[in-house]
Amino acid sequence: MKKIVCLFWLISNYFIGISQNGLENVIVEKYYVSTTNDTLSNSSSGILPVGSVTYRIFLDLLPGYSFQAAYGTPNHELKISTSTFFFNNIENGDVIPNVIPRRSLKKNTVMLDSWLSAGAAGEQYYGAVKDFDNTIETIQHEKGFLQNKNEQLNFSLAERDGLMDAENVPRPTFFGIDSLANIFKFQKKGSIFSTTNGAWACMGKGSYGPDSLTTNRVLIAQMTTDGMFEFELNIQIGTPTKGISQNYVARNPVGNEIVLPSLIFKSEGLSKRKKRVKRQ
């Protein structure tokens, strides 16, 4: 009952005084494409087929707006799926990146792990769109892992790793999806993460991007798979006005809910070029 009450609190609609939509777009970044060296050099890290694609999902928010929750309700299913399975790094991976130690990110394929987030991409790291990575420090991987310079990628991970230092990065809280999230910890063919009564959320003021005064892009998930990747999301964001939120849904809006087409995504296939990142 406590989980249900919390979920209903998260998806309450308060729209008085709202004059603009704070969630402009959902960005899907093709972060990495795995090679033979990544998949065969260390089989103990988990099953990672050649050609697996790592996708990162960012919310492109206006300055002053924050990520509060990704949720599913009876009217709005939240679904993330692949036609094969999600890659899980069995050595140091987890269902949230905040608990993946900084020192482990340089090891084998840890940086390709699948997880849910409220901004983090590792312990004391924000996730950033690679185009806007400040490149102050880039992780050097041991034994030649994650060196692919595939033409589908704007930057290799050796050039820009999409990580920005931070002492305190918001940690997601799960409501009604604790057992479901294990799909990102244990491999299962035909993997589907789906909920109509659950959420991952950032409590308090919500989560802002590492450059919240300009681009304000918040990383909410990373998924690695060699299959067809799809999602439908529903998102609640906080506004600059205290106590007022906005809710965005993939389809079938009710009341003040806002439909945003980019909340629905289907990968184009491994042979096609990456989905373009929105630029400003």
Image (cartoon, rainbow, N blue to C red):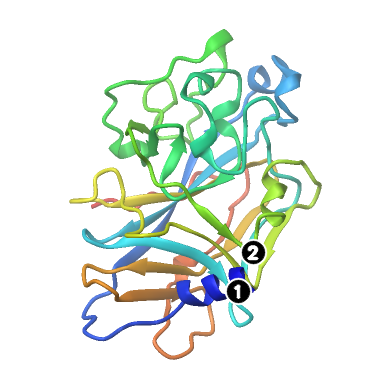
Residue 4 is tagged as 1
Q: Look at label 2 and name its amino acid.
A: Gly
Image point (26%, 30%), residue name: 134
Residue identified by numbered label 2: 176
Q: Residue 33 occupies which quadrant of the picture?
A: top right
- Residue 12's tag is none
Q: Residue 158's x, y, as percent? A: 42, 20
Residue 86: percent from the left, percent from the top?
A: 69, 43
The residue drawn where x is 49% and y is 66% is 263
SS at mark 2 in the image: loop
* Relative to 191, 94 lies left or right: left
Residue 48 is left or right of residue 258, and the answer is right
Q: Earlier in the sequence, mark 2 or mark 1?
A: 1
Against 253, is 110 above or below? above
- Farthest front residue? 2
Q: Residue furthest right?
A: 189
Tell me if residue 114 comes above or below residue 12 in the rendering.
above
Q: Amino acid at mark 1?
A: Ile
The span from disc 2 to disc 1 (Cα, nearest Å) is 8 Å
Q: Where is residue 34, by image quadrant?
A: top right
The 10 Å Cα crowd at callout 1, few under 14, some 14 to 19, many 20 or more, is few
For the residue labelled by badge 1, is the local secondary structure a helix, a strand or a loop?
A: helix
